[in-house]
Image (spheres, rainbow, N blue to C red):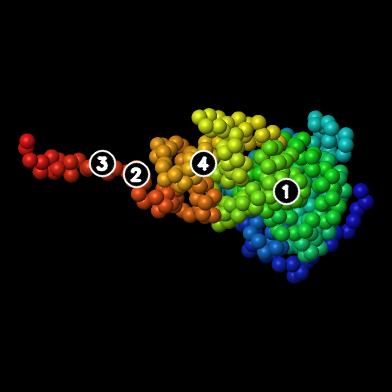
Amino acid sequence: MESREPVVLKRAEHPISRRDIDPDALKVLYRLYRNGFKAYLVGGAVRDLLLGKRPKDFDVVTDARPGQVKKLFTNCMLIGRRFRLAHIRFKGGKIIEVATFRKEPDEECAENVSIDPNTSFGTSEQDAFRRDITINALFYDIADFSIIDYVGGLGDLNNGIVRMIGSPRDRYVEDPVRMWRVLRHAARLGFSIEEETSREIMLHRELLCSCSGARMFEELNKDIASGHIGSVLALFREYGMLPSLFGKIGSFLQEDSRAWNTLQPLLNVADEHARAGRPLPNASTLTIMFWPWAEQILQTGASDGEDKVKVLHDALFDSGMAITIPKAMKIGITQTACIVERMLFAMRSGRMKWSLKKRSRYADASVVFSVITTGRADKEKDPFSRIFREAHPEAKGHRKKRRPSRSRWRKQRQEKPAS
Ligand code: ATP
Ligand code: MG
């Protein structure tokens, strides 16, 4: 690779101030720098600071080898087998990740896992080019507070463009999760996707299914936690990727526009909660996401007398998802959806089976019910009970019978005329 001169923005030419950087990340950067190493802030932190947003995490990259990093920090742990990373721990469980500059593995290295990891270390320039999209490959240099751009990330950030670094085709083949990351960042930031970066996703979208299901579950959780699952799924749908990721559930959401249109505002509710720092449990967000599909399975797939929980359970386990949702979570989703269905029946009929309150999933179901029917999930613990009471004040059984207190009970007995 021929070497290129990076674009460098001096301190006066960009808005990033040290005040906006996490103090522990600053400590790490300074200690590396004062010991003679290069020390850059990199990735999402630089991108978000330039956009005036609060970064989620602060990643550091350096020319110090992992062993050298470890010697500088007592609170450091080296992780990873092939690419060793340093995790520096701070109070409250905070971790600052420090990576050594790396280059894209060449073919021989990529195929041979046992190869010496030292061969994968590189220069800062090589490290920029091995990253995913241009806006994620900017460096903030603690030596002079400048921003270093090898890949055209500053221009793309200004123009609102998500662009894969290098040949999108090759980069997707190498790691298909990069397609997910392109769509994630476009959805989160409201950026457009550069033409070739976009076209190659259409051509290679099936490759995602070859990735580890557990890794994709992690990616899914990141989008739920960041409060952007609605917009990410909308882009998956635009790119026709729902069926391969979510099997039959995805096909249903891909093809049935009505179901999809009903779902979108519901996902917005979950997203708003996550962004406000009051996230719904991930399993509840997934139950909301699967609800349009689950509802039609419960309505059409389960005949009278059949155990609905079993029907939905089997349908979910046979849905052919490429994403591995843990078994316990799938069971939880099934149980929650079945209680929600019972709640909807209660609203129509005025009859509720209150013994369901004893089920462990009742509280989750009550919140999911509220999102589905009212488009809201307030702080209330059991919105279903209130909504049901308001709709059916005449219905019996939803008020707890007050057990007389011991003193009241004694008093009542004393007052009773002797017979
Ligand atoms: P977030 O705000 O979600 O943390 P991020 O861009 O920081 O966004 P991370 O998952 O924290 O995302 O990754 C940190 C950096 O590592 C990215 O900015 C990118 O430069 C690089 N990176 C992550 N995943 C890949 C990948 N699959 N291929 C190449 N580079 C990657
Ligand atoms: Mg990050």
Q: CA distance from mark 4 to mark 3?
A: 31 Å
Give residue 360's position: percent from left, percent from top. Answer: 46, 37
Element at badge 3? loop
Give residue 55's position: percent from left, percent from top. Answer: 65, 56
Picture disc at residue 341: 4
Q: CA distance from mark 2 to mark 4?
A: 20 Å
Q: Earlier in the sequence, mark 2 or mark 1?
A: 1
Residue at the spot of label 3: 403
Q: CA distance from mark 1 to mark 4?
A: 26 Å
Looking at the rendered structure, the kind of residue marked 2 is Lys
Query: Within the image, what quadrant is residue 138 found in?
Result: bottom right
Which of the two discs, 1 and 4, sits closer to the camera?
4
> Looking at the rendering, in which quadrant would you find the C terminus?
top left
Residue at the spot of label 2: 396
Give residue 28's position: percent from left, percent from top. Answer: 66, 52
Give residue 67's position: percent from left, percent from top. Answer: 72, 40
Element at badge 2? loop
Picture disc at residue 122: none
